Image (cartoon, rainbow, N blue to C red):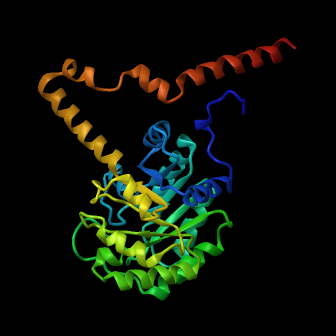
Amino acid sequence: MRENLPVRTRPPAAGVAGAQLRGLLAEPEPSYLMGAHDGLSARIAAEAGFPAIWASGLCMSTILGCRDNDEVSWSELLDLTARMVEAGGVPVLVDADTGYGNFNTARRFAARAQRIGAAGICVEDKVFPKMNSFFGEQHPLAPIGEFCAKIAACRDCVDDEFVIVARVEALIAGAGMAEALRRAEAYREAGADAIFIHSRQRTVEEIAEFTREWGARLPLVIAPTTYYTVPAQTFAELGIAAVIWANHAMRASVAAMREACRALRRDGAAAVEPVITPLDELFSLMGYPELEADQAHYSSLAQKWVDS
């Protein structure tokens, strides 16, 4: 590939993406991952400066017209993830839900995620099929031993750089802080590289209590979807390794598309055109000028071979 192609078109090489994500988790300040759902949203996130991407199960399910209840197959989600890896050019951490069954389906998911160039997966300790953590009250947890075996199976089928994040749902399920800590420690011993401690409280107190008890045993990952007013400095003070803005791009796109459709229906295109992305800007984002330059380059090469 020619050296003057934009970096964003080159996904990280095998093993490199995992090493990059591990580096982000080891930074002294929190790293911020942007939730994405397809190649376009991944490219926008990378252009905005996010160093890594969260391939969100909620967002990918939603753009496929399904609910975040394991209605979409894991192969469909990984097909979308492959687009994100290719388009974004930054490490992608994949939301693996519960691993879609037992240890065998989980390790197959992990292996394929690594093959398509993902940096790692995040597996949660709920029962398959899972419901989105922000909907409803019924969130049964998997037995600890069963989930530990699932982590170990994933660890055994990927390389050492590939990141496995264990997502603890005990606080979501109402099982309490002691159970959350007990599960996190078990998952650490099973081979997890980081712990995603999940909460849907409106304040950060629950997360703060967990961090005080947990210490620095493994990097901690959070998704402050409900406690979004907490300042970034607070996350740094708590020792959080990574903060995921998990679904904001998808929710923003829903709001924008809905408004555009209503305005078009009501007022016509003239009312919408000033507030939507110009085509020239879209072409630039997607690398059309680079493609045009490549076409000229390879056409000249072809002509040289013809002349020779």
Residue 279 lies, in percent from the top left, at 39, 21
The answer to which quarter of the image holds residue 11 is top right
> Is 84 rendered above or below residue 198?
above
Q: Is residue 163 visible?
A: yes
Q: Which one is in front, 163 or 104? A: 163
The answer to which quarter of the image holds residue 172 is bottom left
> Is 174 rendered above or below residue 159?
below
Q: Which one is in front, 61 or 222? A: 222
Residue 259 left/right relative to 103: left
Farthest residue in the left direction? 266
Residue 266 lies, in percent from the top left, at 12, 27
Residue 222 lies, in percent from the top left, at 40, 63
> Is 29 rendered above or below residue 301?
below
Q: Which one is in front, 84 or 237? A: 237
The residue shown at (43%, 19%) is 280
Q: How many marks?
A: 0
Farthest residue in the right direction? 308
Farthest residue in the top direction? 307
Residue 27 left/right relative to 179: right
Q: Is residue 130 visible?
A: no
The residue shown at (43%, 85%) is 182
Q: Quadrant of the N terminus?
A: top right
The answer to which quarter of the image holds residue 143 is bottom left
Q: Quadrant of the C terminus?
A: top right
The residue shown at (16%, 33%) is 262
The residue shown at (31%, 72%) is 206
Residue 14 lies, in percent from the top left, at 68, 54
